[in-house]
Image: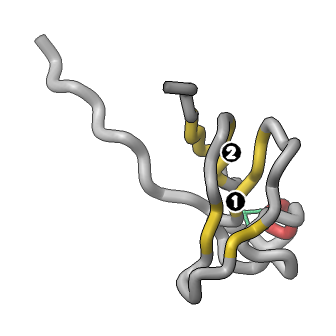
């Protein structure tokens, strides 16, 4: 099975790498064929949602969630 990686960009989008199918809540499928990466908006301000258009760089978006760290040994 091919690998899919989802990486958070600091105060930016989710960067999705690998073969995925992107479908919105209405069941509409986005044509992302041929793309190795897609950046999905996390700030909610993109004019190209669900894709990032770079607006997060100028709107003060600050992502506060981090993956929990393992407990110290
Ligand atoms: S995360 Fe880039 S425009 Fe929203």
Q: Position of residue 29 (x, y in %)?
A: 69, 72
- Left or right: residue 3 versus residue 73 is right
Label 2, secondary structure: give it. Answer: strand
Identify which residue is drawn at 82% across, 50% down: 33
Residue located beneath label 2 in the image: 15
- Left or right: residue 54 versus residue 39 is right
| Mark 1 residue's CB less than 8 Å from ligand 1 | yes
Q: In this view of the protein, which residue sits in the foreground, 61 or 22?
A: 22
Q: In this view of the protein, which residue sits in the foreground, 33 or 66?
A: 33
Task: Name the disc covering residue 20, or none.
Answer: none
Q: In this view of the protein, which residue sits in the foreground, 35 or 42?
A: 35
| Mark 2 residue's CB less than 8 Å from ligand 1 | no
Seen as rendered, the residue at the extreme left is: 73
Label 1, secondary structure: give it. Answer: strand
Q: Position of residue 47 (x, y in %)?
A: 86, 81
Q: Quadrant of residue 11?
A: bottom right
Seen as rendered, the residue at the extreme front is: 1
Q: Is residue 10 visible?
A: no
Q: Give the distance between the C-alpha atoms of the residues marked 2 and 1, in whole angstroms.
A: 6 Å
Q: Is residue 3 visible?
A: yes
Q: Is residue 66 above or below residue 17?
A: below
Q: Position of residue 25 (x, y in %)?
A: 54, 83
Task: Name the disc covering residue 40, or none.
Answer: 1
Q: Quadrant of residue 72?
A: top left
Q: In this view of the protein, which residue sits in the foreground, 42 or 48?
A: 48
Residue contact between numbered discs 2 and 1, judged by CB atoms under 8 Å: yes
């Amino acid at each position: 099975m091919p690998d899919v990686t989802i990486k958070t960009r600091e105060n930016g989008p989710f960067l999705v790498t690998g073969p995925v199918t992107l479908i919105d809540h209405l069941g509409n499928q986005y044509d992302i064929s041929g793309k190795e990466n897609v950046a999905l908006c996390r700030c909610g301000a993109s004019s190209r949602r669900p894709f990032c258009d770079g607006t997060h760089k100028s709107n003060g978006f600050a992502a506060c969630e981090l993956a929990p760290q393992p407990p110290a040994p």
